[in-house]
Amino acid sequence: MLDTFLFDLDGTLLPLDMEKFLTKYFSQLCIKFESIFEPRTLQNAIWASTNYMISNTDKEKMNKDCFFEDFQSRIDHNIEDLYPIFDEFYKKDFVNIKEVAEPNPIVREIIKVLKAKNYNLIIATNPLFPKEAIYQRIDWAGLNVDDFMLVTSYENMHFCKPNIQFYKEILDKINKTPENTMMVGNDAQEDIISSTLGMNTFLIEDYLVDRGLPVYIPDYRGSMEDFYKFVRELPCI
């Protein structure tokens, strides 16, 4: 019985032009570290360490540890001295990126309906960022982090999308089977790969990302408006 929804964040619950987001993100980050790193050096190191984190398959190593382990190998500074600057950036400066987000009011209604019907709700965003940055983006979408029983971040996950272990880890954390769950996302590969576990899937096409291959067939697809109609027809549990 379906009783749990996993939601991607960027491009799904939070309408977002990723190119604009990344441009603004790196602009703000380079300003924060301008006395320490040349902008291109910092950006290249961030990208490389993010890719290292995404490729990790070590179930004993948190995503955060993967990122900073690799980042330290690419810079000439002690990472311990940089942690406070990263923390301050996400607490004080990350909010400056909010202007690129375009919240959709219907998202709040979707979450409201699902909560009223007693479904479990999960933020299953790719855990490439600290929880502070993810909590802020939940807020940008007009949502409350307390509405979700789990929010994935690089502090609490060992794997990233599109690694299928990412979805297995979530199921283990919430003690659910694939048949209990539906993954809702806008990425035809990173989100709909969850279908290979037996999860129900809904591909949101408003900000569709589709690289062509591999091909996964969602159970449902359509706009966020279509998904709203879908949840309104669900039974209470």
Image (cartoon, rainbow, N blue to C red):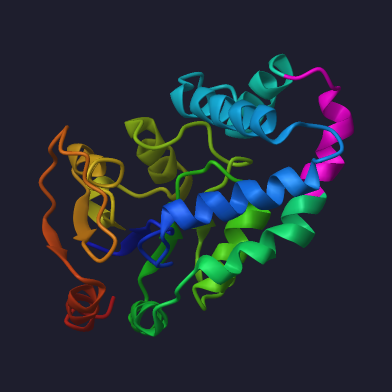
Q: Nearer the viewer, residue 120 or 104?
A: 104
Magenta stretch containing residue 170, yes or no? no
Q: Please identify the quadrant where the C terminus is shown.
A: bottom left
Whether residue 130 is visible to the viewer of this picture, yes or no, is no
Magenta stretch containing residue 78, yes or no? yes
In the figure, residue 47 lies in which quadrant? top right
Whether residue 181 is visible to the viewer of this picture, yes or no, is yes
Q: Main secondary structure of the magenta part?
A: helix
Q: Nearer the viewer, residue 199 or 212?
A: 212
**In the depicted structure, whether residue 146 falls above or below residue 194:** below
Please name the residue shown 57% across and 22% down the image.
Answer: 60
As drawn, the residue found furthest toward the top would be 73
- Left/right placement of residue 117 relative to residue 134 reads left
Please name the residue shown 22% across and 38% down the image.
Answer: 197
Residue 205, image x and y in percent? 21, 62
Residue 159, image x and y in percent? 47, 32
In the figure, residue 183 lies in which quadrant? bottom left
Residue 66, image x and y in percent? 61, 25
**In the depicted structure, whether residue 43 falls above or below residue 10:** above
The image shows a total of numbered marks equal to 0
**Range of the magenta residues?**
75-87
Q: Nearer the viewer, residue 224 or 194?
A: 224
- Left/right placement of residue 3 relative to residue 210 reads right
